[in-house]
Each structure stands twice: as C-alpha cells, then as structure tokens.
Image: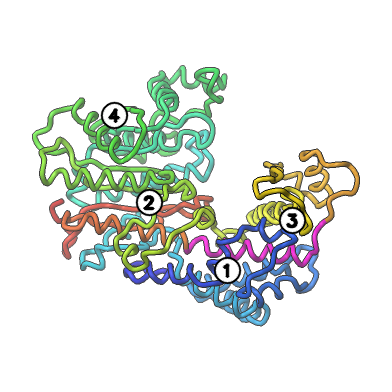
Amino acid sequence: MLPPRASPERLSQIVDFLSEPLVSSLFSLHPNDLGTSAFHPPSAWTEWWDWAGESHGSDIDGARDPWLLLLQYYDAFRVAGTHGTTPAKEVLSELEAIVPATLRSFVHRACRLAASRNPSTVIYSESELLGYSGDLAFAVNNSQTSTNLSPRSLSGMSPKKAHEVVQMSDFTGQLLASDPVLSSIKHAVDVGAGQVQGPPYMISAYLSRSLRDRFGLHVLALDFSDIQSQGAAKRDAAPAGKRRARQTAQTPYDEAMQTIPPEVPPSLMQTADDVDQQPPPASPGSLTYFTTKIDADTLVESTDTWIAAEQSPEHPIPILFVALHACGSLTPDIIRAFITAKRRNTTTPSTWTPSAAVIVGCCYNMLRPEDFPLSHTLQTARPNFTLTANHLQLAAQVPSQWTRTPSTLHAARLALRKVVWRALIEDVLSPPIPAFSTRASPSDTTTPKRLGRLNDAAYADWPTFAARVQAKLGLPDGEPLARADPALERRIEVFHVLRCIAGPVIESLLLLDRATWAQEMLKDTNMSVELVNLFDQASGSGRNVALIIRPQSNANGSAINA
C-alpha cells in the first residue's frame, strides 16, 4: 500500500503502471466491445484470456469462477501485505498455483500503488516530509471515538450518510482543537450544502447544523439550487411543533418537491440518549443559506458578501472551508478559492482569510478535462499522460469491500452480471456490418438500439433477461436470445474485475495529484496539505478520503503563523 509520506516519484510510478500495455488496454476497451463477434483480444492478454475461458471446477455457488478466484487472490494479497495474517497467507499460497503469473503481477503492483484505505490513516502528509510534527493522526484517531451520537439518532438518513456526517463533524472539532490558530476559527463555509429533497437527504445541511450546534460556529451554507436551500432554510426556521407535525404528515414543501424525509432533532448533538454528555458551545452559532453557481470565483465572492454583511472586522476573520462529497471539479475549485484568497491577503486588505479546509471529493466522472493533471510535478514528469472517461468511471470502484459479507458478495455478483450480460447482447443492439454489405457510405448507418436500465429482477436468470430484452427492444417473438459461450462470459467477468482492481490506483493518482498541486500553490504560505482516510469504506462510504489544508506546525507542535 502507498506509504503515508508519499514522494513525488509515486505519481510517476502510478502513471507508468497505468501506461503498461496490459493495463492501458483494459481502459481503451469497454466490456461491450468484448461481446461483439468481431472482437479479438490483444496479444498482451493471451495468458489470462486462455485461463479465464477455462472451467476451474463446478461449485454450486460459483466459488471457482475465474473472476472470484482473481478477487480472492487480490483480497489475500492485500490483507497479507497489510496485516500479515496466517489465513491470508495460506489462501495466497493456494491461489498462486491457480491464478496465472500475469494477473498475480498485476494484483501485486495494483495493491502496492493504491493508497491504504484503512480508517484513521494519513495517506499523504507534506508537513511530516518537511519535518513538522504529525499531529493530524491524533485528530483522526480521536474523531473515531469522541462522539456519543449514534448514527440512528440522525433520523431520515441512511447509516452510511449518518456515519459520514458524524465522523466529519467529529474530525473537524478535533482539528480545530488541535491547534492554537485553528481554535480561533468561529466561521465556516459549507460548500455544496442545503440539499433537502430525496437522496442524499440534505446530508451537507446536516453537517452545517452540526458545526453550528456542536461548536458554535457561524456557518455559510452554499448550494447550487435555490429550491434546495430555500427548503433547508424553511426547515431550520420552522418551530419544533410544526416540524413534528410535518414529519407525521410527510408533506412536501411544494408540489414540485419530493416528500421531505423525517426531521432530525434541532440540535444534532443533544438527543435523548446523550444530552447530558454533550456540553453546549460557549457561544451560539448561526446558519446562513446562500445559493449561487459555485466555482472558485463565486466561492470567494460569496464569502466576501457574507462577512461584509455580518461585520466590519479590524483584522481578517479566519475561515474554515468544508465540503462533504464535493462533486467532480468542485474539489479543485474549492482549493483554487482557498489559494486565491490566501494569496490575495498578502497584497490586498481583506475582511477574511482562509485558515483551514476539510474537503471530501466524489464523482470523478464529472471532472472537467482541465482538472487533471493539476500538479506541476506530474505535468513535468509525464507530460503526455491523461485519464480517459473509462479511467474516471472506474476510479470509484471499491473491490476491497466486495467479499466482506455474504450480502456484499451477492451485490457484487449482481453488478457484475449486469455488466457482462449487457455486453453479451452487443451484437443485438449494434448489429455488425456484413463483409458483403453494399452500404453506400460510412454515414449510411443504422442507429444502435439502446437497452436502458432494467430492474434487478430482470437478471434472475438468462431466460428472464432475454425475455425482458426482447420485450423492451420490440424484437420478434421467435427464437429467444441465445446465451453466448460460457468461456466468453467468464472472460468478460475477469476483464471487468481487472478494471475494478485498478480503480483504487486511479483514485490514488487523482488524490495525490490534487494534494501535490495544492502544496505547490500554497508554497511559502505556511500551510500544510494532507490526505486522510476520514470514513470507513465498510460503512458504504467509498469516497472516504479528505484533503486537509491547515497551518504548518513547528517541531514543538505549535502552529507557524498562517
């Protein structure tokens, strides 16, 4: 696994891995390509392609399927390398005689290059590289146990989202208390807050309220949609009795919105179970809602407006930026806003200054092309490398969690079946052009059919799937869709699992590039950049890494004036 103090060479090592013929071919093709009658595997695939096509014993539960054998080898190597447990080593020894050398080498490098995703671990810490004290791990570890708020007390939220809100709030409190400079922060900007209708049930607005109620912070909750933030503001302002009545009636705020999820207690940290254990903040905070098209410029402008409306300070007010699942390019935009404001304060008087940030990104598939690569380090070392849409889609995969429980394995089987069975009907959706075709020109084409989404029940077995496809596409009722050769099905399964195993390596590259770039841009500002595993992926929080910006610390632990 990637060591906490990653050197710049790690970026180049990951790019070199992704550029190897076998690995790059996995992302130059799509599973649907393999399902066509015209497909021929690249020469780099010969060993594993032949192995995947073979039957490795017949188990009723499919335990000897090549894709699962590959996944088990990946799990065993990853666990043995991290914990050195005897059972993992025994499984590894057994599977070494089954999984071909090409795939074993692939797994070894993927595991070693991917960042550790264990909760509470620091992935990247530039301050430690520079010789400053590493007190961030203390804050992360303390945040795992400091709260008395159980996720179930966050009514209306899934356990996953409750875990994220509780954990991020806890960590933020620990971070603010860990540093004399940060302990003076009384203002925070929650970027992407206020969602109120449907999933994810106003997750960032909950975070805003938690920061206000637990720590007495004045919070600016920024959001994209006026409807979302108006709904959140109404919800926050409603008297408790009306909130309870609305919860019972399940009434939407207006006909255009979905039913509002159940209410949470007015103070997130003062439920019936723990009201006596949570001291109130020294001074009450506040919550301000504002909607705008959020980018680097409007984030700075919105903060300017908010602070100017609140007071005219004699000295710049320190600001904390937080973002829970900043989608796509929003994470780079928050970093840009932080850098812009920090640099501006050195030349122009300002009413506020960014002092820290806690940012959890997501949705790499929505990243703007110009937002990778970002760091000068990577651009210089590998100037011609880029990530395709296939890379960005697979960066969100978390294969380490697939075999964690019987239910997660069942879900993985179903997800894989959906990918593979869709690939097997590619020739039905996009019929191949016969060699004797008299088509007049390349533009004289038949529009490919689109299958769209089918529910889980459609994948119960092949006859059910075939019947559902024929009905949806309006195909003749004659001969049913034939299932492809089982060898091809097994090969597509292994192909897709290989892509997913490379996913954490791609995400590690994105995270390290962002952290390196932020550190480059904040040079000489006495700010430090870290990457930490804030959430537990076992809770369903696949995007569990937070990018932290905070003041550097001296060897004695005191903050350098930032």
Q: Quadrant of residue 236?
A: top left
Which circle, 4 or 2, is nearer the viewer? Answer: 2
Q: Is residue 156 above or below residue 71?
A: above
Q: Is residue 295 visible?
A: yes
Q: Residue at x 21, y 53 (%)?
A: 551
Front disc: 1 or 3 = 3
168 shown above or below 128: above
Amino acid type, callout 3: Leu
Pick whichever of labels 4 and 2 is earlier in the sequence.
4
Q: Residue at x 81, y 43 (%)?
A: 470
Location of mark 1 (residue): 75
Q: Amino acid at mark 4?
A: Ser
In this orientation, which residue lies closer to the viewer: 264 or 399?
399
What quarter of the picture does the N terminus occupy? bottom left
Give the distance between the C-alpha atoms of the residues marked 4 and 3, in whole angstroms. Answer: 56 Å
> From the viewer's perspective, is the residue at label 1 or at label 2 nearer?
2
Q: Which residue is mark 3?
A: 424
Q: Find out whether the residues at labels 1 and 3 contact each other: C-beta distance under 8 Å.
A: no
**Viewer-proximal residue, 395 or 45?**
45
Residue that mark 2 sits on: 371
- Amino acid type, residue under disc 2 in the picture: Asp
Element on which disc 2 rests = helix
Reading the image, the residue beneath label 4 is: 286
Q: Please tell me which residue is depicted at 23% across the width and 29% down the height of the picture.
A: 305
SS class, disc 4: strand
**What residue span does the magenta drawing correspond to?**
483-505
Q: Position of residue 243 (x, y in %)?
A: 47, 21
